[in-house]
Structure formats: C-alpha cells, structure tokens
Image (cartoon, rainbow, N blue to C red):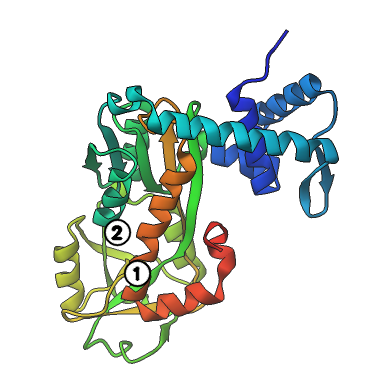
Amino acid sequence: MPELELRHLRAVRTIAEEGSVTRAATRLGLTQPALSAQLRTVERLVGGQLFDRTRNGCVPTDLGRRVLGTARLVLDEMAQLMSTTPAADRRGPLIFGCIPILYFARLVEGLRELNSDVRAEVRPSSAEIVDMLEGGQVHVALFEFFDGMHARDLAGIELRKLVTEPAFVALSETDPLAGLEEVDLGQLADRDWVTPPKQNIGSRTQMFQVCADAGFVPRLTHHTGEASMARGLVAGGCVSFAAAPSRTGEGIVIRRLRGMPLMTDIFVAMRRDSPVAGRAHEVFACAAAAYRSVLDRNPDYRKWWDAHPEAHPEFN
C-alpha cells in the first residue's frame, strides 16, 4: 500500500498556491497527468477530496485545508532541518547555472546566504543551461523559455516562473526614433539587427513571428553574444531587442515597443537532490530580490512593471 511522501505534500501545497493542477505541474517540472496521479494518491490515503474545481481554479475543501496546513508545517520543518543539521555543513558547493543576466552578482550573493560555497556557470544558451541542470552539472538554474523547452523531461526538478518580461528595443541615441517614448516594431523593418548567434536565441520562432506580424523579416546582420560589442554596434546605427531592465547610456537609448509584442518567460529551477533541497521557496526569493534590484535601471520598465502585476504574480 502506498504511503504519504514529501513529494505528495509538495504537490498539495503547490496546487493550492497555483490554484491550478496545470500551473502546479509546470512549477514542479511534472506532466499534468503525473501530478494528477499524485493528487489522487493523496486523496485515497487521507480518505477524501482535497480540492473543488471551480471557475476560479482549484479551491481546497475543508479536508484539503486541514491537509494543506499539515503539509506546510511538515515541509517548513523539513526545510529548517535541512538548513541546520551538521550534514548540511558538509553538503558541498552549490553550483548555479544561468544565462547572462544583469542581476547575476546580486543573485549569487543571495544564494550564498543559503549555502556559503556557491560556484557559478554562465552559458549563452538557455537550452545548454537546462542540459546542465538535467545532467547534474548545476543544482540551481535561471533561464528563459526556449524553443523545444516543453519537450524536456524535467523529472526531479522543481520549476517556477520568475517573471514574464517584455522585450524593449535598443537604438542609437542619434536614431530618428530615439526621441519617441515607444516604437512600433514595423518602424524597424529597414534596419540592421544585432542578435546573439542563432543557436543562442531561445525564442527564435517567436522573434520571427512578431516581426512577421509587423510586416517584415528582420535583417539579422550582426551576431554577437558579447554585450559591449552589441551596444557598440547599436550606438553605430543598428538596432536590437533589449532586456527590459537595460539602461540608456553610452550612445544608446532603450525604448519600449508599442503593444509589447515580444514577451519572454524567465524561470528558476532547482534539482531536488541539490545542496539546498527543500528550500525552493528561499531560492526563488533570492532570484526575486535580485530581479527587483535592477528594475529602476529602466524607469520606463519600472512604470510598466507597476502597471502590470499579472506579469509577475509571485512578486505581488
């Protein structure tokens, strides 16, 4: 006869927090059928239905609320135990993998509060970071959505969306469009674009689609993954998509795109056998604090952020 396990308690807690089995499965790195099977197992073990399915999502029943309270207590106690036992002091380094991000140093600093020995691996491709996560070369990862991500087997990995980030555009400060508050993507149809090498563009399909919707095929003239080189090319008259917290200066301006046509999901993921196992919430909090630290680099993005809480529900 099956027994109640920590993964079952995490499943109940995550479904309650997400209000959806589908979203909870994504966060936990499981398929929806696998998570539904776990939920049915728990319901058989405790003898009743834990959630009502309503128009507003999964709502805990009376029994569900009791089980949820116990689940939270047990999981919090386990996280505390993992952080204070002598074994935790011998658990080894925490390896953090990520794509190039503006808040890298701040995030590493935060992770050091969870594990004093943090080592980092930065790669240009989100797919490569997930390869390393699946293979155990990194324990915690931050990456963007990429083509083919849904086909990955993320068993044993807790996955949580950090934010849905709109792409801005970088222009030369001498560009005729630089004086506008926002730029229509179609106005950039005749420009030379700077992008990372094609194998490092995670959402290449989406990029071409939004340009097609604007009536053009982007002229991908220059390819570099080195930020200062890209900025130099833009200062010289090219254009590029830019991360929302990018800063105006050094010959370039950062402008929002009308309608925010290109949105990218950014994820935090952690292996369940990592040195910080059981502390996924704290890992996510580190990432959230690091992300907040760069919001004011682009005042226009900060304004958009404050007006669109739906893009970052976990921050609210």
Image quarter where the C terminus lies is bottom right
Q: Position of residue 124 (x, y in %)?
A: 26, 47
Residue pictured at 25% horizontal, 51% vertical: 197
Residue pictured at 34% horizontal, 69% vertical: 245
Name the kind of residue labelled 2 in the image: Tyr
Residue 145 visible somewhere in the drawing: no
Q: Quadrant of residue 291?
A: bottom left
Q: Which mark is residue 245?
A: 1
Q: Position of residue 251 (x, y in %)?
A: 17, 81
Q: Position of residue 300 (x, y in %)?
A: 41, 80
Q: Nearer the viewer, residue 284 or 248?
A: 284
Name the kind of residue labelled 1 in the image: Pro
Q: Quadrant of residue 45?
A: top right
Residue beneath disc 2: 103
Q: Is residue 88 left or right of residue 272?
A: left
Which one is earlier in the sequence, the residue at label 1 or at label 2? 2
Residue pictured at 59% horizontal, 26% vertical: 7
Q: Position of residue 315 (x, y in %)?
A: 52, 61
Q: Secondary structure at mark 1?
A: loop
Image quarter where the N terminus lies is top right
Q: Nearer the viewer, residue 102 or 206?
A: 102
Residue 122 visible somewhere in the drawing: yes
Q: Is residue 123 above or below residue 196?
A: above
Q: Contact (CB < 8 A) between labels 1 and 2?
A: yes
Near mark 1 (Cα within 10 A), the count class, few <14, some 14-19 or many ≥20, is many
Q: CA distance from mark 1 to mark 2?
A: 10 Å
Q: Which of labels 1 and 2 is toward the front?
A: 2
Q: Is residue 10 above or below residue 302?
A: above
Q: Which mark is residue 292?
A: none
Q: Is residue 195 above or below residue 148?
A: below
